[in-house]
Image (spheres, helix red, strand yellow):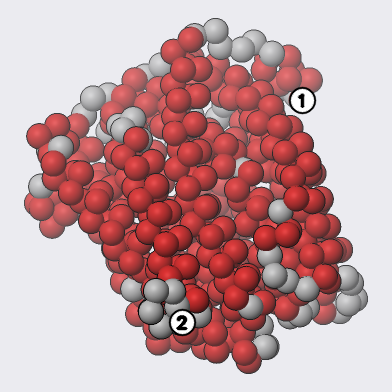
């Protein structure tokens, strides 16, 4: 199908009220959950930004390493959603429990390995991102504490993903709200040493993160046990791995995990490129990225809700609906992107007063957010189209190849040359680093509207 034909076909929107109700309700609840999650990161940035620019920069780089671990575990949970939502559509609850067990095993393995790796090599890992010794020392303090939270997050993210695949999403919102309250409160108390507590600086922020992760994990486990009559989860589900499910899960999960590792690693390299351009560039990138994450919650939530809706529809065997839904979703993504771009551009001048950073960092942050207000339109289309529609349809390998080619063969080489050979400014580097968000749109448009990504599992009824 050519480009003109694709757009003409996309004009035929779905008229089912149930589809829009499901998409909007799932997206809004997941978005609220994301708002709260980003609010935790924003509170960390604000409190550490008010404490010192060194602490803010150190936490920002440490979070890039933490991001790799969490992104891999999210990849495990995303694989659970793709497989379990199909089984939910086919109402195969027994097999869903086996999928959860396999996903949990993968996620816990990643959590434990990354925890041990980060504890043993925190200084060496941070040295890859910056040469500033003060930033490395502070970042190592942060990682030495926060790394223990990986195991808790491994459990929480898979359980919440499993519930989401069965369209149970309110518990995720509640958990995120608890995390926000606990994290913000402890950050304030421990970073500055309020009410007689020691002023721990960046170590206090890491302690707050660890405590909130432990508590949210306990809440989710208690919820699952309390509602076990309907969910039917037992310890046996996590001790005995079904080989047939393991094979299906691996086929879906492996490309997603490789893609997640590729993407998270690329984000770390991007931060490393900017990190070698000074603390102002690091701080500006941290501020701009945090605000960007905050205003794009609907975009990322739309991808998550798409995975549930499309996976369930494929599981029900309604392949004609899958095509119709994909056309409508693409229009919705573009609308979300335009609204998000306007919000980011309008609000960018009104958020920097919260940060105690240098004038140079503030100027860079404003410029970075202006660039993001343009590229976010592309992000809002290509990201949910590729990671939502394509992956839930069963074509997880294409996203893996696409991410690798764009990031590691095009964007990063060009940015490295621009930064270290041609010595371009941080602004030019930032534009290069974000250019893939526009370029991927053309690939997504063609791929999604050819419908070759719809794959029914061989063992699916």
Q: Is 233 left, or right, of 305 in this rendering? A: left
Front disc: 1 or 2: 2
Image position, residue 299 (x, y; %): 59, 38
The answer to the question of whether label 1 and label 2 lie on touching residues, with beta carbons closer than 8 A, is: no
Image position, residue 171 (x, y; %): 31, 40
Seen at 52% across and 45% down, the residue is 35
The image's mark for residue 199 is 2
User: How far apart are labels 1 and 2 at the CA level?
Assistant: 59 Å
Frontmost residue, 348 versus 227: 348
Classify 313 as above or below 412: above
Q: Residues within 10 Å of mark 1 (few under 14, many from 20)?
A: few
Seen at 36% across and 69% down, the residue is 210
Q: Is residue 343 visible?
A: yes
The image's mark for residue 288 is none
Q: Secondary structure at mark 2?
A: loop
Frontmost residue, 53 versus 60: 53
Work out which quarter of the rendered image holds the N terminus and state it. top right
Question: Dot 1 corresponds to which residue?
Answer: 3
Classify 343 as above or below 294: above
Image position, residue 250 (x, y; %): 34, 51
Sequence-wise, the earlier of marks 1 and 2 is: 1
Q: Is 418 left, or right, of 82 in this rendering? A: right
Q: Is residue 395 visible?
A: no
Residue projecting furthest to the front: 195
Seen at 73% across and 78% down, the residue is 279
Image position, residue 233 (x, y; %): 14, 43
Splitting the image into 4 quarters, where does residue 330 fall? Answer: top right
Q: Secondary structure at mark 1?
A: helix
Residue projecting furthest to the top: 15
Classify 34 as above or below 449: below
């Amino acid at each position: 199908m050519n480009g003109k034909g694709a757009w003409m076909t996309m004009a035929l929107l779905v008229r089912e009220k149930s589809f829009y109700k499901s998409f909007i309700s799932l997206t809004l609840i997941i978005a609220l959950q994301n708002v709260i999650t980003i609010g935790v990161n924003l509170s960390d940035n604000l409190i550490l930004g008010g404490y010192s620019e060194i602490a803010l920069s150190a936490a920002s780089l440490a979070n890039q390493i933490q991001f790799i671990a969490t992104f891999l575990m999210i990849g495990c949970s995303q694989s659970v959603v793709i497989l379990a939502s199909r089984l939910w559509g086919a109402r195969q609850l027994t097999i869903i429990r086996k999928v959860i067990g396999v996903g949990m095993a993968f996620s816990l393995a990643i959590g434990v390995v990354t925890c041990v790796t980060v504890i043993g090599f925190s200084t060496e890992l941070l040295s890859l991102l910056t040469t500033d010794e003060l930033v490395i020392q502070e970042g190592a303090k942060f990682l030495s504490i926060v790394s223990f939270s990986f195991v808790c997050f491994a459990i929480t993210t898979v359980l919440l993903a499993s519930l989401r695949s069965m369209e149970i999403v309110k518990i995720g919102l509640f958990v995120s709200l608890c995390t926000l309250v606990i994290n913000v409160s402890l950050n304030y108390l421990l970073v500055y040493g309020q009410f007689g507590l020691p002023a721990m600086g960046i170590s206090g922020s890491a302690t707050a993160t660890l405590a909130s992760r432990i508590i949210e994990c306990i809440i989710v486990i208690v919820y699952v046990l309390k509602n076990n009559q309907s969910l039917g989860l037992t310890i046996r589900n996590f001790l005995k791995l079904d080989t047939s499910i393991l094979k299906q899960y691996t086929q879906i999960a492996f490309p997603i995990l490789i893609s997640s590792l590729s993407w998270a690693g690329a984000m770390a390299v991007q931060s490393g490129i900017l990190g070698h351009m000074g603390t102002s560039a690091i701080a500006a990138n941290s501020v701009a990225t945090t605000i960007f994450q905050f205003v794009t919650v609907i975009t990322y939530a739309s991808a998550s809700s798409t995975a549930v809706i499309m996976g369930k529809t494929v599981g029900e065997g309604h392949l004609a609906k899958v095509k119709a839904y994909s056309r409508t979703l693409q229009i919705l993504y573009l609308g979300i992107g335009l609204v998000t771009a306007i919000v980011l551009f309008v609000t960018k001048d009104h958020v920097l007063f919260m940060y105690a950073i240098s004038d140079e960092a503030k100027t860079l942050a404003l410029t970075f957010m202006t660039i993001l207000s343009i590229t976010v339109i592309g992000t809002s289309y290509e990201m949910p189209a590729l990671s939502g529609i394509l992956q839930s349809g069963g074509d997880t390998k294409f996203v893996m190849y696409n991410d690798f080619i764009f990031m590691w063969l095009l964007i990063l080489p060009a940015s490295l040359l621009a930064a270290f050979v041609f010595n371009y400014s941080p602004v030019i580097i930032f534009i290069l680093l974000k250019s893939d968000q526009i370029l991927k749109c053309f690939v997504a448009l063609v791929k999604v509207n050819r419908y070759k990504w719809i794959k029914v599992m061989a063992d699916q009824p």
